[in-house]
Amino acid sequence: MAGGRLQRELKKRRPFDSLEQEAALNITRTADRFGICFTRLFREHGLTPSQYNVLRILRGEGKPLPILEVADRMLTAVPGITGLIDRLEAMGLLARERSTEDRRVVFVTITGSGLELLARIDAPEAALHRRLLGHLTPDELRELTRLLEKARQSLDDCGG
């Protein structure tokens, strides 16, 4: 069977309909495989990828954020941000409080336990990044990033 690596991996007999289709499916396949690796890592620490993302956002900000701001900064769309926050609060990894100016706004902040958990994940996560992408040169990584950002420009048309 001729064709590229993805065509062989999928055991696809016919060529892809277009280069765009092949590229889009390569992105999907790669994101899925990477996602599996990260999900396993976070699961070892009792987190889902979305929970980890919330904690990283809060650690990076260094101050309380409104829940809707956290939702806007998520890597992936989360339909139930309130439930996600509830679970992290129950785990003692973040705390919430209502705004004194606007009672409709709820702020969340990472706790000491949340910071400690992220500190334990930092080294294994960095090692996973190196394992997944360390075979690319710095120039290749910059080009990959540039191309992926360019590809995402079209998402405005479909609500992404």
Image (cartoon, rainbow, N blue to C red):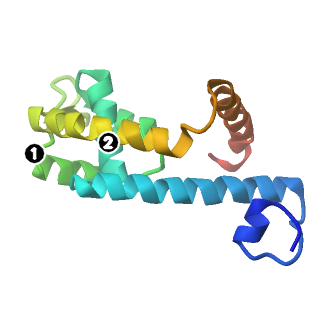
Q: Is residue 106 left or right of residue 160?
A: left
Q: Earlier in the sequence, mark 2 or mark 1?
A: 1
* Alpha carbon separation for disc pair 2 and 1: 22 Å
Residue positioned 14% across, 47% down in the render: 89
Callout 1 secondary element: loop
Horizontal and vertical percent position of residue 111: 13, 34
Horizontal and vertical percent position of residue 91: 12, 51
Q: Is residue 74 left or right of residue 154?
A: left
Q: Disc 2 residue type?
A: Pro
Callout 2 secondary element: helix
What's the mark number on residue 16?
none
Residue positioned 20% across, 23% down in the render: 101
Q: Compare residues 94 and 100 and report the one nearer the observer.
A: 94
Horizontal and vertical percent position of residue 27: 67, 52
Q: Compare residues 85 and 45 and report the one nearer the observer.
A: 45
Mark 2 closeness class: few <14, some 14–19, many ≥20 residues within 10 Å: few
Q: In the rendered image, which residue does mark 2 sit on?
A: 124
What's the mark number on residue 92?
1
Q: Disc 1 residue type?
A: Gly
